Image: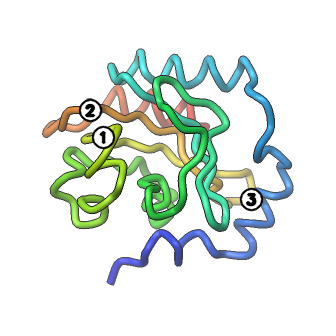
């Protein structure tokens, strides 16, 4: 049975690690903005986010071409990546994946269709969120091996 995003985000150790970085709700920073810009370029997507998954929301430290700076967990695709902190989560078509087909960002504006998220993991192994790329069209082939490697390197 797959855990819901809400169940995955509640780990006290993970939340303490995130709080320890004291990064939530901080101003934009050029370094993070550069990372999302590069992720869009390398993966040929219109959208990229540095997404931090907190207890009741996901907040974007950096974003390119995404209208919101945070969403609730019901709208979080990134929270699903918490189940596999050792690999990039790729969902070629969000409309047909049972984890995301009813997601408000899929069924409504901005009508996202493709997602790939590389884990943001602390040196102690706590996953704080993802560096993700998003497209408004499905990508049956996902990302190339090189794109997965590049996204992983940027997330690291």
The residue sitting at 63% across, 75% down in the picture is 10
| The C terminus lies in quadrant | top right
The residue sitting at 60% across, 59% down in the picture is 57
First in sequence: mark 3 vs mark 1: 1
Q: Position of residue 36 (x, y in %)?
A: 54, 25
Front-most of residues 57 and 8: 57
How far apart are the alpha carbons under marks 1 and 2?
5 Å
The residue sitting at 77% across, 43% down in the picture is 25
Q: Residues within 10 Å of mark 3 (few under 14, many from 20)?
A: few
Q: Residues within 10 Å of mark 2 (few under 14, many from 20)?
A: some
Could you say whether the residue bearing mark 3 is in a helix, strand or loop? loop
The residue wearing badge 3 is 124
Could you say whether the residue bearing mark 2 is in a helix, strand or loop? loop
The disc at residue 90 is: none
Front-most of residues 61 and 156: 61
In this rendering, the answer to whether 33 lies above or below 13 is above
Q: State yes or no: discs 2 and 3 in contact (Cβ < 8 Å).
A: no
First in sequence: mark 2 vs mark 3: 3
The residue wearing badge 2 is 136
How far apart are the alpha carbons under marks 2 and 3?
35 Å
Q: State yes or no: discs 1 and 2 in contact (Cβ < 8 Å).
A: yes
Could you say whether the residue bearing mark 1 is in a helix, strand or loop? loop
First in sequence: mark 1 vs mark 2: 1
Q: How many marks?
A: 3
Q: Position of residue 75 (x, y in %)?
A: 44, 56
The residue wearing badge 1 is 112
Front-most of residues 125 and 135: 135
């Amino acid at each position: 049975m797959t855990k819901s995003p809400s169940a995955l985000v509640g780990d006290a150790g993970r939340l303490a690690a995130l709080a320890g970085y004291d990064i939530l709700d901080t101003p934009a920073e050029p370094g993070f903005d550069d990372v999302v810009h590069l992720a869009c370029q390398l993966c040929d997507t219109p959208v990229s986010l540095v997404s931090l998954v907190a207890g009741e929301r996901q907040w974007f430290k950096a974003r390119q071409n995404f209208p919101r700076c945070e969403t609730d967990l019901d709208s979080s695709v990134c929270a699903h990546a918490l189940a596999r902190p050792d690999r990039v989560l790729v969902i070629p078509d969000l409309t047909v994946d049972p984890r995301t087909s009813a997601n408000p960002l899929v069924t409504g504006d901005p009508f996202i269709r493709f997602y790939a998220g590389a884990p943001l993991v602390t040196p102690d192994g706590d996953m704080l969120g993802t560096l993700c790329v998003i497209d408004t069209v499905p990508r049956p082939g996902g990302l190339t091996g090189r794109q997965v490697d590049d996204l992983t390197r940027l997330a690291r």
